[in-house]
Each structure stands twice: as structure tokens, then as C-alpha cells.
Amino acid sequence: MNKKTDDNVSNDIENIKKDDLTGQDRFAWNLIVSWASQLVLIFSGFIMPRLVDDKVGQAALGIWDFGWSFVSYLSLVGLGMGACFNRYVAKHRAAGEITLLNNVANSAVFVQLIFSVVTILCTVLFYTLLPIYFGESLAENTEIAQWVVLFLGLSVAVRMSSGSASGLLTGYHRWDIHNALHAGDSLLSITLMVAALYFTNLGVAGMAIGYLLSTIVFESLRFVFVYKICKEFNFNLRMANWNTCRQMLKFGIKSMLSNIPPIILLQTISIMLVSAIGPAALAVFARPMALTKQIKTFMTKFTLMLTPTTGSMQGAGDIKAVQALFINTTKLSFAFALPSLGFLFIYGDVILNYWMGPEYALWPLMMILACGQLLPMGQDTSIRILMGLNQHGRISIVAFIAIFVFFGIGLYFSGLGDWELTTAALLFVIPMNIVYGFIVPIYTCRELKLSWFGYVHNSFIKPLIYILPFLGLLSWSRHLYQSNEILTASLFLVAAGLITLIIYFVYLVPVKMQNKLLLRLKLSS
């Protein structure tokens, strides 16, 4: 990109001062686009496992899940950098510190390119060592697993190299573009993967190739949008400096320590399942986990926007706004998580039965995963707010250590010889609840000088009361469904949804927004 003159930079500063640089004016629109794009990902997540299971079998589906479990460890190479530096982009832009913004952005580009090369080397190493350590468990599927790991690992390297572009777009609060590109990537990848399944003999290895090609196309497009939107950014690696790189790495490592434990925990359990029971068991375990993961992703689309918004508020010196943001967004998070996970708790096995078949429909497993992820999922706002304030270092270390200590204790009592799928689920949800359901939110309240009991009352108890009619009607609907009264069960299900929408509209939607909606619907003057 061409270097701007001083006059152009001055004009840019004057223009951005006219905007709401906290991103709150774009919050609702960004969230709508984020969730709409997630519907595309849900479609992909539902259709591909069933196609793989039907076309090449349950064992091949387990290999696909195994490949992703292995490759997920590659995210450690990035040391948490990714797009997390959007907090600094938003903060410096809000303060009009354009030189610092460019120092941060170019330093991030430089570091991300190095990490991308390291990721490629690690992928090749995984490819080489996989037959040595997993040849006996994978047996005849070993070579296929190698190719899956190789191409998925290369896609992680490509995504890592474009992390700076993602950070710039989200630092400018353009989550709509960020997520639209993600949705487009998903559509192209599912098209290529289906083509690989039905028109080649490559199986899941061909799917991995299709995923890599799609990743290259859409991650390249991110830089095009950076050029068009991020007008204050000048690409010049000479602006990268060691002090800024060190600051970014320090922030990234703290972010990684707070975000990566659930990923490592889940992937470790998945790999242990393959070793203990086999890839087919992992395929069964991964499907209910995938349902809860879709809800988690919806929540993450919402909470990720809090980090740059909080950074902008901090740059403007508005700490009281941060306190209000934390309370209100946590309340909205629980308002979304409670009915979503409640539905999976009650009807999850029915969904699995229609989606994948009766051999996947394990109701106890589904109930453990749905109930066990409520508190961590509803309070993901805690760590995002702390990241925006750059106060997540100490608690990240505590969370990283604690989650594996509790996992180790659970593993000691459960043993390794007689594992069941419910055992794996409990080993995941119990540490998650202790650390992200209690320890991290309590610490966040202390840092923001908020009453813990006031926080619980406003952010959790109120949404729980609002959702009780939904859970009651849904439970009765399930009872009728089991009695083969399908029509009546469906009516109760619809009634539960309608009543909840009315309650949410009255108690959760701000009065100004209520009036605007009523006016548009011509229900109020």
C-alpha cells in the first residue's frame, strides 16, 4: 500500500473522529451478520458428517475428527496472536494515535508470517511422526490420516498468515465483513468437499484438499478489504519494531493461556478416546459435542466483539461503561444460552437420531454436554472484557494451570482402562465449570469492582426466571413426543418459543428499541 502524506493522515484522523470508534453503533449490525454467517457454518457442520458417514463410513468420519484434533494443537504455534491485537488497533484508532496503530499492525504482520512458516514445519513433522505413534490404533487408515493432517495443517498456516488482516478488520469494528468472508469460505469449502467425496476416490483426504483451496481464496480476500477499509493503515514492515512485537507477543500469550485450555482439553480427550476405544467411538462422541459447539460459536461471535469495544472504551477513559457492558452482555449471553442448551438437554437425542442415526443418539451423553457447558458458555464475556482491558494475564495463568489440574484429578479417579463416552464428557465439563464457570467470572467482578451477588442476580438469575416457562413447556412437549402425540408435542414446542419471545421482548429489549419495532409493525403510534 502507498504511504500516505501527512495531510491525508490528518484528514483520516478528522474523519474517524466523526465516527463512534467504540463500535457500539455497529454492534447490532455486526451481530446480525455474524449470526447469519454462522447459519452457513451450521449447514456445513450438519451436512458433511452425515455425507461422510454414508459415503465412506464411520471409521473415515472418525479419521476426519482425529485429523482436526491433531491439527488443533497447531494453534499453539501462534502464541495467541491471531486477531487478538484488534484491541490495540481499536484503542489507538480511538485515541487518534495513527503512528502507534501502524507500528502495531506491521509488527503483527511480521510476527504472523514467521508463525506461519513454523506451522508448516510442524505440520510436516506431524505428518512424519503420525505412523510411529498412532500406526497401531489407526491401522489401515494411517496413510489417509497423514494426508488429512497435512492439508488441514497447511490451511491453518494460511489462516495464521492472514491473522493480521482479520485483526485490522475487527479492530475497525468491521465484524460484518470478517464473518461474511468466513461464511463464503464455508460455502466454497463444503462445495469442494462434497465434490471430492462424490467425484473422486480421495475420500476425507480430498475433503482436506478442498478445505485448503477454499482457505487460500478467502484468506487472500481479507487483504483486499483491508486495503479498501483500513485507510489509516500503511503496509510497511520497516515500521515493525522489536518492542512492539514483544508487547504483541506478551498480550497474545496471555490471550492464548485464557483461550487455549478448552481446546487442548477437548482434543486431548478426543485423542485418548481414539487410543482407548477407536476412531468410531470418537465419531459418536464428536457429534453431540458438535451441537453444543454450534451454540458456543454463536456466543463467541457475540463476545469476540467485546474485546475491541472494551479497548476503545478504555482508550476514551470510560470505565463505568465497561462495567455496564459486562453486566448487560453477560445477561444477554445467558438469555441465549439457556434456551439453546435447554433445548439440546431435552431434545438433543432426537436431533442426533434424525441427523446421524440411532447409533449416535446417546441421550445421557447429550445431557451431560448440554448442561455442563451452560456456565462457561454464558460467561465467556468475562475473559473478553479482561482482554479488552489487558488485565487477563494473571487469571489466564491460573486458568491454564487449574483446568489441567482438575482434569488430572478426574483422570486419576476415572482411570484409563474402562472409559465410556460419558466419562469423557464429564472429564471435559467438570474442569470447564470450575474454571470458566466460577474462577474467571469472580476474578472479573473483582477487577471491575462489582458485587459478585449483584452480578449473579442481574446476569444469571433474571434470565433463568424468564426462561422457566420455556423449559416447562419443552419438558411437557418431550413427554408428549415419547407418547407418540407428535402434533400436540409440536404445538407445545411452538408455544414455548412464542411465549419466550414475548417475555424477552418485554424484559430484555431496551424501551427505545421496543418503540421502534412497534412503530415499524404499526402496532404503536
Image (tube, rainbow, N blue to C red):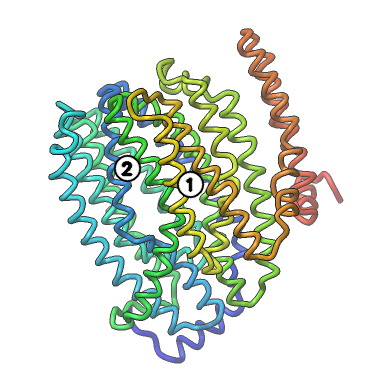
Q: Quadrant of residue 211?
A: top left
Is 195 on the left-hand or right-hand side of 484? left
Q: Nearer the viewer, residue 35 or 229?
A: 35
Q: Residues within 10 Å of mark 2 (few under 14, many from 20)?
A: many
Q: Position of residue 288 (x, y in %)?
A: 46, 29
- Cα–Cα gap, marks 1 and 2: 14 Å
Residue furthest out toward the right: 525
The answer to whether residue 58 is above or below residue 302 is above
Residue at x 80% of width, y 46% of height: 522
Secondary structure under the numbered disc 1 in the rendered image: helix
Instruction: Determine the residue positioned at 47% across, 72% down.
Output: 89
The residue singled out by tag 1 in the image is 37
Q: Amino acid at mark 1?
A: Ser
Question: What residue lies at 37% left-to-right and 46% top-to-bottom?
Answer: 264
Q: Residue at x 45, y 69 (%)?
A: 229
In the rendering, which numbered label is found on residue 61?
Answer: none
Q: Nearer the viewer, residue 513 or 151?
A: 151
Give the residue at mark 2: 189
Kind of residue indicated by mark 2: Ser
503 or 71, nearer to the observer = 71
Residue contact between numbered discs 1 and 2, judged by CB atoms under 8 Å: no
Residue 488, picture quadrant: top right
* 133 lies left or right of 226: left
